Image (spheres, helix red, strand yellow):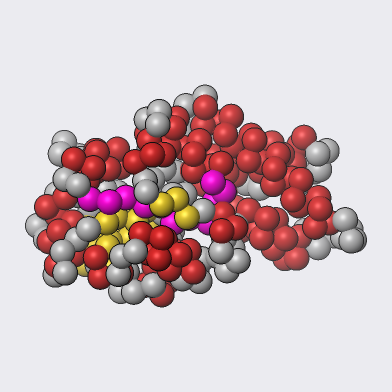
Amino acid sequence: MKLEALIFDVDGTLADTERDGHRVAFNLAFEEFGLDWNWDEALYGELLAVTGGKERMAYYLQKFNTDFPQDDKTADLIVDLHKAKTRHYTELLAGGSIPLRPGVERLIQEARDAGLRLAIATTTTPENVTALLEHALAPGSCDWFEVIAAGDIVPAKKPAADIYVWALEKMNLPAEACLAFEDSENGIKSSQGADLKTIVTINEYTRDHDFTGAEVVLDNMGEPDAPFKVLAGDAAGFPYLNVECLQKIHGA
């Protein structure tokens, strides 16, 4: 079956949003609410074991800040904090603080030119996806993606496969016609749970994750003048991801 569509994770895959975006935005929200919570880079790396911002805050209180008094209003506090965090995150994006990772913009443009269909499958909120695409990719680029599966659109978040299954259903495509792009162990568990062949581009938070079953594991998508490093799997001899490379990987 020929390659028809590409499905992208967002955070850590399209841009290094976690360390310099979401983490910073969480801390700004905590400060806004007068909380003494602060997530440094090391702690945030541990919190990334849980997907979803609201879920991450609940996990933080459960495991790392057990002295914080919780009551029947804690769930509402988390919701309000998450709204504030999303606002701070979009402001960071609007200010140009979070660029796309190497090769991302070029590959997406080449895929569009080749007639490949594009989709997003992520646990981050739709607002965060829109802000990243509009500010870091191009104005109007949300319209390049025929499906944006994001946030709470399915109840079970990654590593559950639900978000990918939902995206495939909306595109009316079998998994065999697609490639997924991920950056984390939870991400590849999700994509593989939907039977998707997956390309992984690691980041500093995920370099030690288990990517068993990935078609190829790379340090980034690469550029013609800045090749990627192949960490596992087979990139079919290509120095950077392009449509021909993707077709070879997909057909292998």
- When the figure is inspected, residue 203 is found, relative to residue 173, above or below; the finding is above
Check the picture and name the quadrant holding the C terminus. Answer: bottom left
**Residue at x-position 34% and y-position 41%:** 144
Q: Position of residue 55 (x, y in %)?
A: 66, 60
**Residue at x-position 56% and y-position 54%:** 151
Horizontally, residue 57 falls left or right of residue 197, namely right
Q: Position of residue 50 (x, y in %)?
A: 59, 63
Horizontally, residue 86 falls left or right of residue 192, namely right
Place residue 155 in its image quadrant.
bottom right
Q: Position of residue 118 (x, y in %)?
A: 32, 50
User: Is residue 219 at least partly visible in the picture?
Assistant: no
Horizontally, residue 171 falls left or right of residue 155, namely left
Place residue 217 in its image quadrant.
bottom left
Give the residues in magenta: 116-126
Q: Position of residue 36 (x, y in %)?
A: 80, 43
Q: Is residue 59 magenta?
A: no
**Residue at x-position 14% and y-position 54%:** 245
